[in-house]
Amino acid sequence: MANLLADKTAVILGVVNKWSIAYAIAAAMRREGARVILTCQNDRLKKTVDELAAELGAAEVLMCDVSKDEDLATLADALGKYAPIDAVVHSIAFANKEDLSNPFVQTSREGFRMAHDVSAYSLVATARVLTPLMTRGGSITTLSYLGAVRVLPNYNVMGVAKAALESSVRYLAYDLGASNIRVNAISAGAIKTASARGIKDFSKMLETVEGKAPLRRNTDPAEVADTAVFLASDMGRGVTGNTLYVDAGYQIMAM
Ligand code: NAD
């Protein structure tokens, strides 16, 4: 391709296996010439993520559980040697399995708190610790889903957390714009990943989209990844505070 990210350094949070959207983004960013650093949630996953990092030619894998402020501070310290950082990709979400199958009205206080902490607040916390390393400006991109703005049965508390995430994108874009740091969300179509399998009847969502989306198919993670490249590149320099749909057009449909 065009080496759109030559001389740029990207930190990508959220690779757990090769089906992760973050993995597709890391591969596309490497293809475009970026130096890439991955993070990994815990020790248990480190071996797999190390192997994927080696395949990708990533510079390093650093540990970070985004629900822990101390992990985020340690991550920022460890990334100091790679500064300036130009792009941050936040591809992280979590909710209890029962909250993705029971009626939404049954969501517990703790389930609601945790989904919002990991899936929305972590973007704010990550931006706070990493933007001091983004001294020449740059781009922060997170991953959202249609459930932020429409009701999809079983998506439940995650939809509410994605609404908070998309709103956080707008507030962060305003704060960080003064430092020429852009903040955007990609609202990806449904993709079969480890997290998606936690949503009850996820395969029915894929079937519905295939039948109804304008492009008559589901979303390829590589399409999401190329949009992440665009946002991180200088081609995206005028885009901030947005939620971009990469979903084969499904979000425009009513019937
Ligand atoms: P995935 O399971 O591959 O990735 C989720 C990642 O979140 C994993 O790497 C996991 O380790 C990480 N994570 C969870 N809790 C964490 C914590 N406390 N600290 C650090 N990392 C943590 O699944 P995915 O589908 O690639 O999900 C990536 C993002 O894309 C999520 O925000 C998801 O909501 C979003 N998204 C997914 C789809 C889809 O259909 N798969 C559609 C739209 C948006």
Image: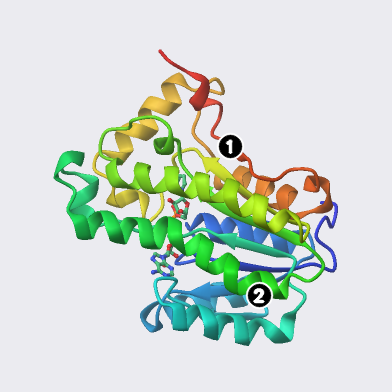
Q: Is mark 1 within 8 Å of ligand 1?
A: no
The quarter of the rendering in which ligand 1 is drawn is bottom left
- Report which residue position mark 2 lands on: 58
In terms of image quadrants, where is residue 180?
Answer: bottom right
Q: Secondary structure at mark 1?
A: strand
In terms of image quadrants, where is residue 240?
Answer: top right
Residue 203 against residue 237 in the figure, above or below: above
Q: Is residue 176 left or right of residue 147?
A: right
Q: Secondary structure at mark 2?
A: loop
Q: Which mark is residue 68?
A: none
Name the outermost residue toward the top. 255
- Report which residue position mark 1 lands on: 246
Question: What residue is at 17 percent from the left and 40 percent from the top?
Answer: 105
The picture places residue 2, in percent across and down from the top left corner, at 85, 52
Q: Is residue 240 left or right of residue 246?
A: right
Question: Which sits in the foreground, 222 or 231?
Answer: 231
Question: What residue is at 59 percent from the left and 56 percent from the top?
Answer: 24
The picture places residue 202, in percent across and down from the top left corner, at 31, 40
Q: Amino acid at mark 1?
A: Val
| Mark in front: 1 vs 2 | 1
